[in-house]
Amino acid sequence: MKTPIRSTFAVLLAAGGLIGASSAIAQAAGSDATLQRERAVCDGVLQDRTACLREAGAARHEARRGGLTSAAPINYQQNALARCTLQPPADRTACEQRVLGTGRTTMEGSVLGGGVIRETVTPIVAPTPMTAPPAAPMTRPEPMTAPAPMTAPAPMAPLPLR
């Protein structure tokens, strides 16, 4: 009776090993396909190909370790708002508007192109021009007396010769 139990156990163990091996092979094939896709992407970017491949390999290694995760969008927003607190108080509100996309905010660009540029337009009402004080009424100028004519200067004497 021990022999059938041992045989059944051996068959189950072998089947489990085959399933685990096929899973590892499928995972390796999937990661190889991912690596091939990443290499193809590195051919079409503006970045240095060597650096791109190095980053793809590092990302693949980190994914195997389970450390490649993406934060929730709210965490990115909280991080951006925390950066706005470092701005001077006069600029803080405009920074928060750019991050939150409120007001007249436009976004353009991409990470691949070098960054996302956010621009917020804040209209400022021009101050009312100051009114000049009323001008004093013009008065008639006083008549001036003409100066006395000048007398002719005396002729110059010649210098003695030496």
Image: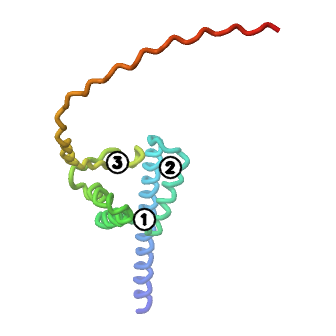
Looking at the image, the residue that sits furthest to the bottom is 1
Question: Which residue occupies the foreground of this view, 19 or 102?
Answer: 102
The mark that comes first in sequence, 3 or 1, is 1
- Residue 115 placement (x, y as % from top left): 39, 48
Q: Which mark is residue 68?
A: 1
Q: Secondary structure at mark 2?
A: helix
Q: Secondary structure at mark 1?
A: loop
Q: Are marks 2 and 1 in contact (CB under 8 Å)?
A: no
Q: Is residue 89 left or right of residue 30?
A: left
- On the image, the x and y values in percent for residue 57 come to 51, 56
Q: Residues within 10 Å of mark 2 (few under 14, many from 20)?
A: some
Task: Identify the disc placed on residue 11.
Answer: none
Q: Quadrant of residue 91?
A: bottom left
Amino acid at circle 3: Ile
Closer to the chain start, of discs 2 and 3, is 2
- Name the spot of residue 29 as percent of width and height, x first: 44, 57
Q: Is residue 70 left or right of residue 154?
A: left
Residue 158 position (above or below residue 132):
above
Q: Alpha-carbon distance for marks 2 and 1?
A: 17 Å
Q: Image point 43% across, 92% down: which residue?
A: 2
Q: CA distance from mark 3 to mark 1?
A: 26 Å
Does residue 78 lie above or below 97 as drawn? below
